[in-house]
Amino acid sequence: MTEGSVSPVPKEARPYQGERAGVVTRMVASIIDALVVAVVLVAAVVGVNGVSYMLDPRGFEFTSAKPLTSLTAILLVTIGYLTIAWVTTGRSYGGHVMGLRVVDRNDRRLLGPARALLRAVLCAFFPIGILWCMGPAHRSVQDLATGSSVVYDWSPRGPRGQRGR
Amino acid sequence: MMSGPSGSGHHGRVDSARMEALRGGAGLLVRGVSGVAGALVGTSRAAVRPVRRELSLLLDLAVPAVLDSVLRRVDLTGTVRRYVDLDALVSGVDLDAAAARLDVDAVAGRLDLDAVAARLDVEAVVDRLDLTRIVRERVDLDGLVAGVDVDAVAARLDIDRVIARIDLVGLAEDVIAAIDLPEIIRESSASVASDTVRGARMQGISADEAVGRAVDRLRHRRVRS
């Protein structure tokens, strides 16, 4: 929001803007993100098989990835997706739907690539850490580890041009 | 010795009295002259004294009459104007001392100030004054304005006429340009695409608060037990 402009945020939501989000909203956003990752992976599998079919229609066999490969792919896609989202706009698609943004705990700026990557890794490997934000401070394990906060922010424009480490 | 013309009754009485005096004066003059002659001849100083007194009486009577008669026949104003240097005379007068002796209050009391004021050209006086500066320096404008009933003034305002004079369309365009309304509309449509999303977000916030309250209650219960 620039000074002097009119806020696009509805009146009833304005008092919550900038406050730390609770566990329900964050879990819903995480589920949406998980669905996005799933869709991407399914699309990737379908794409690989489609290419394989087009290259050799007679010898085509549907190839499903091995568990370890699938898990690796899930983790890599999740980490890459979340890192890029948090570095560029501060929020993933789930965060966009639920009106959340990941920012620095102190100066409320966007996370830098390193911290965003660390946070994404922690989210991918220890998703249950989100339950820590049921506490009064609304901080998950990922927040505590990376010095970040997840806040309500319905404004589409984030802290533009500002980036932390 | 000549007497003035005797026209009216009053003047006639004055002239007859004057003639009587002159007649007496002539007698005195005769006696005086004879006395003087006697003195010149060689009479004593004691004999001259009564003669001198009579001569003095004669002059007291004769001089005013003569002077009056002369002045009546002379244009004294013209003569003074012609022979007297009035400027030199006036320059020798101590006007300050004369003014100091003046009772100005008494003079002012006799003046008809209303008539004087009526002759004043007030417009010309006002034109020469810098009224703006005088008001700014000498008038307590804050106190003046504080005493004004602004509500009453506003109540007398014809707001419709005021609004009619304003270019509302131009004003609205300026406001829209200043707040970048198109950008706000774009942001609004991008951020809150639908009522469903808005509803989901608000329900999420409510659920967060509910969970927060429940967790707080549980924690308090544990602390008590």
Image (cartoon, grey):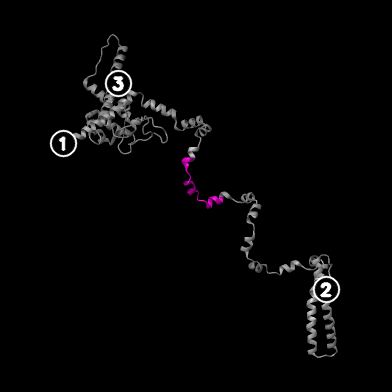
Kindly report the distance in space between the C-alpha atoms of the residues bearing marks 1 and 3: 44 Å
Q: Amino acid at mark 2?
A: Met
Question: Which percent across, then down, holds residue A67?
Answer: 21, 21
Q: Amino acid at mark 3?
A: Val
Q: Extreme left residue here?
A: B225
Residue B132 shown left or right of residue B177 in the figure: right
The subunit letter for the residue under badge 3 reads A
Question: Would residue A146 be visible to someone looking at this image?
Answer: yes
- The residue beneath circle 2 is B19
Rendered position, B169 above or below B83: above
Residue B28 shown left or right of residue B124 in the figure: right
**The residue tagged with tag 3: helix, strand or loop?**
helix
Quarter of the image for residue B33 reads bottom right
- The residue beneath circle 1 is B222
Say few, some or many: other residues with alpha carbon within 10 Å of mark 3 (under 14 / 14 to 19 / 20 or more): some
What segment is highlighted magenta in the picture? Answer: B133-152
Q: Nearer the viewer, residue A124 or B13?
A: B13
Identify the disc placed on residue A40.
Answer: 3
Q: What residue is shown at x 85% (from left), y 86% (from top)?
A: B37
Q: Amino acid at mark 1?
A: Arg
Quarter of the image for residue B186 reads top left
Kindly report the distance in space between the C-alpha atoms of the residues bearing marks 2 and 3: 157 Å
Specify which label sits upstream in the sequence, 1 or 2: 2
